[in-house]
């Protein structure tokens, strides 16, 4: 039993109130118990705490320890330059924290937008007197007065109504007003006509209602709760980055500790050993990775914006690329939402458009004209797209009609029909015969209109509607729906008086099939999705046959798709639904937006990466729950836009597919620059190993490592992030969730192939300078020795020079650079120019020398390092040839 | 199991609604219902009158429902007086409403509800009233943790509540996601989760089956409190019945308190049930 099932007296009794309303004292008590009637955001971790968390994960802790020990070392052993190192590591922690935070940050304003839909003041009756109070003070049991234009402040049971019409768009997405009544209703609260929900609007009429739920207990509060509490969780990229950083931190720690003990065993002093351990950690950590990923995502979002997909959360750029299922609306997304009458059917004959004037069609079109709220004003049709299409068709075929509307029973999604009572005037071209003066016209879904018809108009005569006629109508209805048309049925009845019951013993006049043409680019986009292994689930309010016909027309369904209707969906258990969702082709028909979240939740529980489209307020929870919530830029409400991760500026399905392609390219590009960044880790680590194992001066200082990771590598890596999508990227299935960003193949290529070449170049440059300067094996040099500084500078320069070749090598994993076009990514050259200029600054500018402890080297040193770069480039090209051949023979 | 049920009523409407739950349970269990109002010293006359009216309404309703009912009005300390009645009459289960001020206090510390649940020598059902429109709950959400004591009594209480309203029970277990240090969180589908259903919960469901109660189970990884409130809101559950928190104050401060968090965000009415034996 629910509040909607009760009589007025029972409602008053159960809510312990009366027709005089609550007393002020009681209202105050209830306010103290139930709280203010307002929408609250659920308690979440504050932005500041979220920012602080970036400093406390495993890698950050490791770096903090490194920085702390460096500073401690400076205190105990001043003059070793450890303070600079400590500060530099702290800087790295802050930079990484900031960029990770920027990736995750998202302005949450959906609750603010929801709050705007509630009223500020409301009229209530308390102690028998009408008062205006703040809507926040409404409590359960309050008697609320509703009149035209009012917003409803709380979920309330209507106890008195006078032609009350409510617009429930904020809850149901239906823009048509719904008639409300105060009698007891069976069924659920949410579907009851005697309930006025918070956030809805009184369109006309008046009424009195008793509040039974306020604030977050209302339906509106439920949407707010879900919108604010539901979280999609970490994006696939964020999860991968967490794994990558943990692996790196783990490896660094193991290496640092292991070599610290080896150093200790071979008799190296504590502080030397300590510098080494910190150096190993710093060399292993790709300090520039997170800033580069963030900037690359930002660049990806810019490119998507140009394709009319506005990205709100940076990580969504990559998440799009991993999507495995798209749950999409039909009207306006797959179709153009430009309704057009395509077919009319009467018992006499059937036709397609034209100016046929047979009697039934004439009456049918008059019904379509008069039972219609669209208007033709100043040469333009205005109103709901379906009604506009009907008015346009009727007007073009039978001309203007004059009539006076006496009253209307508006359309609503429950009754699925609307009726108008019209007083017909004897003005041409309308003839008073065969219709008398007061006529009720009805239009709606066939299952709603046919049961109220007793007769049928056939060959200008009204005959009894028998079973044969019903079958004939049903067949015609199915035939029109199978053509993908939205089919409406029409009927009329003659009334003795304007107050006679209008929807009784009606005359069935015919059917009209309306087409909502698919968007021209959608078929191609769906084909792309199928090739890319992405499943598309259509969720529509349309009837099943219409949905299936459209699905077949656009290529969404090829065989016989599984169709689940709204009523069946509601009764289905999660287990059954889970099973049905595994079907290859699936369509949900006669659905409302409130059902979307359940579909999305189950798909996510099954491990799918889900994108969902939505435009209404009640779409917001599903948009939040999905991996990618996609709001419509044109038709979408502010709440939906705020709850989404991406806004489609053109409401077009094809734009989603373009964005997915871009997302896949972003992921591939992230792997490219990870290869690039990780390659330079080896020439950073090897000098430390050589230092500890062979007792040579340290070939590369920690600050110089940071110069590579956070300086010279950055722009070339970013340029790799701007590589165009590889050919065939949308012909591959979505990437396996088990596939790692940092997989063994990538690590092998970076650590065992590209990295060692760079390390060889670095050590060659280092020893070349030392040997040229007369250095003897085993001789240790002070850190401010010019020869030593030149040697480390040569080592650093060797890394930079080989990284220039490496940036070309990393542009693809298997294709030759010459095939993808040496000059096809101009940003690469800008990146290289930056890299070289920065290195020139480090090597030749006094400020660069001071910061990075470098010293100028002769130009010929650069030249003797170039062969290493050429070798790396050629070796990589040969590797790619082998790789392609192997793939070819394997049939890949 | 329940032969004598007491419902504490005061001048607040939520106590009356809480007592209605007690009345429905009494009707199903054919138990005797005690409706008690304890007027504290210095209580305003208007408040006393309101509480007495509530007692009268409940009394009449119980009589209409053919429930053996007795009303008790006393003055003094509510806790002491109720404790006295419980001991004297041999009450099996006591119903009381939580106050908004209770849930605003961290960890329930020092609240009447907490003291009641700790001190009464019987099972205690603390009712948080959120929604006055769902008079008879059709869908009851029962969040269970992995390790539960007194399964039999819990199952009995929930089965009887479900029987009282003809409700369907949804057993829900939110568990910690499975993680590995180097792999992070590992995704497991609901069917795989079902295989990991804790024994206690499976046992609980066996008891429900014995009571012939229609139920469904769901096991999901995630933050406990948030998962419960999201499940309740998204599936439009009418009532949540949850076990009382067993966490100490220190443990609550360190690890958080799911019961407290659910109480704050519950989108529907909620009963925190503490079987008597848990006090022993």
Image (cartoon, coloured by chain):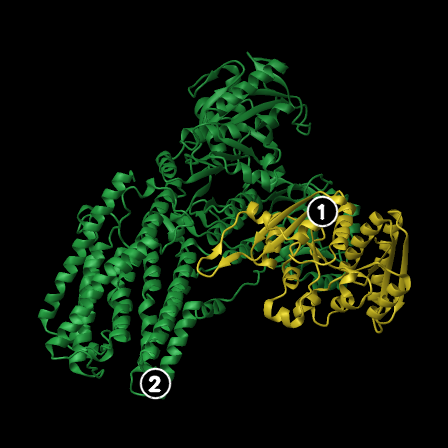
Q: Which residue shows up at 38% across the image and 53% down it? A: A740
**What residue sits 42% from the left and 53% below the top?**
A236
Q: Is residue A668 left or right of residue B8?
A: left
* Quadrant of residue A698 within the rendered picture: bottom left
Q: x, y (%) of residue A114?
A: 54, 54
In the image, taking residue A811 as reference, residue B264 lies left or right, namely right
Q: Residues within 10 Å of mark 2 (few under 14, many from 20)?
A: some
Give the mark toward the camera: 2 or 1.
Answer: 1
Q: How many marks?
A: 2
Viewer-nearest residue: A773 or A607: A773
Q: Position of residue A198 (x, y in %)?
A: 62, 51
On the same chain, marks 2 and 1? The answer is: no
Q: Colour of chain A?
A: green
In the rendered structure, find residue B158 and report the number of the disc placed on it: none
Residue identified by numbered label 1: B206
What residue would you read off at disc 2? A74
Q: SS of the residue at dot 1?
A: helix
Q: Is residue A186 above or below residue B25?
A: above
Question: Residue A498: x, y in percent?
Answer: 66, 28
Q: Which one of the lettered chains is coloured yellow?
A: B
* The image quarter in which residue A709 lies: bottom left
Cα–Cα span, label 2 and label 1? 67 Å
Q: Name above or below for residue A493 compared with residue B105.
A: above
């Amino acid at each position: 039993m629910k509040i909607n099932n009760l009589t007025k007296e029972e409602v008053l009794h159960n809510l312990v109130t009366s027709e005089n309303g609550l007393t002020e004292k009681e209202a105050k008590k209830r306010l103290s118990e139930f709280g203010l009637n307002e929408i609250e955001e659920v308690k979440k971790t504050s932005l500041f705490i979220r920012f602080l968390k970036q400093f406390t994960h495993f890698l950050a802790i490791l770096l903090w320890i490194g920085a702390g020990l460096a500073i401690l070392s400076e205190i105990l052993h001043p003059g070793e330059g450890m303070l600079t190192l400590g500060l530099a590591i702290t800087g790295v922690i802050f930079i990484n924290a900031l960029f990770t935070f920027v990736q995750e940050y998202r302005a949450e304003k959906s609750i603010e937008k929801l709050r705007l839909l509630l009223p500020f003041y409301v009229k209530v009756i308390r102690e028998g007197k009408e008062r205006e109070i703040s809507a926040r003070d409404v409590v359960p049991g309050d008697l609320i007065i509703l009149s035209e234009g009012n917003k409803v402040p709380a979920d309330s049971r209507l106890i008195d109504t006078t032609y009350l019409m409510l617009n429930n768009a904020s809850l149901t997405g239906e823009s048509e007003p719904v008639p409300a009544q105060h009698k007891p209703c069976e069924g659920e609260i949410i579907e009851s006509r005697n309930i006025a929900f918070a956030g809805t609007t009184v369109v006309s009429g008046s009424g009195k209602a008793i509040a039974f739920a306020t604030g977050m207990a209302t339906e509106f509060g439920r949407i707010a709760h879900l919108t604010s509490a539901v979280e999609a969780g970490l994006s696939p990229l964020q999860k991968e980055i967490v794994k990558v950083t943990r692996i790196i931190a783990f490896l660094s720690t193991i290496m640092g500790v292991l070599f610290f003990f080896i150093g200790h065993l071979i008799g190296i002093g504590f502080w030397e050993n300590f510098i080494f351990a910190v150096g190993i950690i710093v060399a292993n950590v790709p300090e520039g990775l997170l800033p580069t990923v963030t900037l690359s995502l930002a660049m990806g979002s810019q490119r998507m914006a140009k394709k009319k997909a506005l990205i709100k959360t940076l990580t969504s750029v990559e998440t799009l690329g991993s999507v495995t299922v798209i749950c999409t609306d039909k009207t306006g997304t797959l179709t153009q939402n430009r309704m057009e009458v395509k077919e009319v059917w009467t018992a006499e004959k059937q036709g397609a458009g034209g100016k046929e004037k047979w009697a039934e069609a004439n009456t049918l079109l008059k019904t379509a004209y008069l039972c219609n709220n669209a208007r033709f004003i100043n040469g333009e049709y205005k109103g709901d797209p379906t009604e506009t299409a009907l008015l346009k068709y009727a007007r073009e075929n039978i001309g203007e009609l004059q009539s006076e509307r006496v009253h209307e029973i508006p359309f609503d999604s429950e009754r699925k029909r609307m009726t108008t009572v019209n007083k017909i005037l004897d003005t041409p071209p309308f003839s008073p015969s065969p219709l008398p003066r007061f006529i009720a016209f009805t239009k709606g879904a066939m299952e709603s209109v046919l049961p109220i018809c007793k007769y049928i108009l056939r060959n200008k005569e009204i005959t009894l509607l028998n079973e044969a006629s019903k079958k004939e109508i049903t067949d015609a209805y199915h035939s029109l729906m199978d053509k993908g048309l939205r089919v409406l049925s029409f009927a009329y009845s003659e009334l003795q008086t304007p107050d006679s019951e209008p929807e009784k013993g009606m005359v069935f006049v015919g059917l009209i099939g309306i087409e909502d043409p698919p968007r021209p680019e959608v078929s191609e986009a769906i084909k792309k999705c199928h090739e890319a292994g992405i499943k598309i689930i259509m969720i529509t309010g349309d009837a099943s046959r219409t949905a299936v016909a459209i699905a077949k027309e656009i290529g969404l369904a090829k065989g016989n798709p599984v169709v689940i209707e709204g009523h069946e969906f509601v009764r289905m258990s999660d287990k059954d639904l889970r099973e049905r969702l595994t079907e290859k082709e699936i369509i949900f028909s006669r659905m409302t937006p409130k059902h979307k979240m359940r579909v999305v939740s189950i798909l996510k529980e099954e491990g799918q990466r889900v994108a969902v489209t939505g435009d209404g307020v009640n779409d917001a929870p599903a948009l939040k729950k999905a991996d990618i919530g996609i709001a419509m830029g044109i038709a979408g409400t502010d709440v939906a836009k705020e709850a989404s991760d991406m806004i489609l500026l053109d409401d077009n399905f094809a734009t989603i597919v373009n964005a997915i392609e871009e997302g896949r390219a972003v992921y591939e590009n992230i792997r490219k620059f990870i290869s690039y960044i990780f390659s330079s880790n080896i020439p950073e680590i090897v000098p430390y190993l050589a230092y500890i194992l062979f007792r040579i001066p340290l070939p590369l200082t920690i600050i110089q490592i940071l110069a590579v990771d956070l300086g010279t590598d950055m722009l070339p890596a970013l340029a790799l992030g701007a590589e165009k999508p590889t050919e065939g990227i949308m012909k591959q299935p979505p990437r396996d969730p088990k596939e790692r960003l940092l997989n063994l193949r990538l690590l092998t290529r970076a650590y065992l192939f590209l990295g060692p070449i760079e390390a060889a170049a670095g050590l060659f440059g280092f020893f070349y300078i030392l040997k040229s300067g007369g250095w003897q094996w085993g001789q240790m040099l002070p850190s401010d020795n010019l020869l030593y500084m030149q040697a480390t500078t040569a080592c650093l320069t060797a890394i930079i020079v080989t990284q220039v070749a490496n940036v070309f090598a990393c542009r693809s994993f298997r294709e030759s650079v010459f095939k993808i076009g040496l000059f096809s990514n101009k940003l690469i050259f800008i990146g290289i120019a930056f890299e070289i200029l920065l290195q020139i600054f480090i090597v030749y500018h006094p400020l660069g020398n001071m910061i990075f402890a470098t010293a100028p080297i002769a130009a010929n040193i650069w030249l003797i390092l170039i062969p290493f770069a050429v070798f790396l480039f050629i070796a990589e090209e040969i590797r790619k040839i082998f790789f392609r051949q192997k793939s070819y023979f394997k049939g890949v | 199991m329940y032969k004598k049920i007491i419902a504490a009523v005061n001048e607040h409407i939520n106590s009356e609604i809480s007592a209605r739950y007690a009345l429905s349970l009494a009707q199903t269990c054919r138990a005797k219902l005690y409706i008690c109002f304890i007027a504290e010293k210095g209580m305003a006359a208007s408040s006393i009158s309101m509480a007495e009216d509530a007692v009268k309404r409940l009394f009449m309703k119980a009589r209409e429902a053919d429930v053996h009912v007795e009303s008790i009005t006393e003055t003094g300390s509510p806790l002491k007086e109720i404790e006295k009645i419980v001991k004297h009459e041999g009450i099996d289960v006591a119903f009381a409403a939580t106050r908004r001020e209770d849930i605003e206090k961290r960890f329930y510390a020092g609240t009447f509800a907490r003291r009641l649940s700790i001190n009464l020598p019987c099972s205690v059902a603390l009712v948080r009233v959120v929604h006055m429109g769902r008079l008879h709950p059709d869908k009851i959400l029962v969040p269970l943790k992995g390790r539960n004591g007194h399964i039999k009594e819990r199952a009995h209480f929930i089965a009887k509540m479900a029987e009282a309203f003809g409700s369907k029970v949804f057993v829900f277990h939110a568990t910690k996601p499975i993680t590995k240090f180097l792999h992070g969180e590992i995704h497991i589908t609901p069917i795989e989760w079902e295989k990991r259903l804790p024994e206690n919960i499976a046992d609980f469901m066996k008891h429900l089956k014995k009571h012939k109660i229609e139920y469904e189970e769901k096991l999901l990884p995630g933050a406990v409190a948030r998962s419960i409130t999201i499940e309740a809101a998204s599936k439009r559950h009418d009532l949540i019945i949850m076990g009382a928190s067993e966490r100490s104050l220190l443990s609550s401060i360190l690890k958080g308190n799911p019961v407290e968090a659910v109480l704050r965000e519950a989108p529907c009415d909620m009963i925190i049930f503490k079987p008597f034996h848990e006090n022993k």
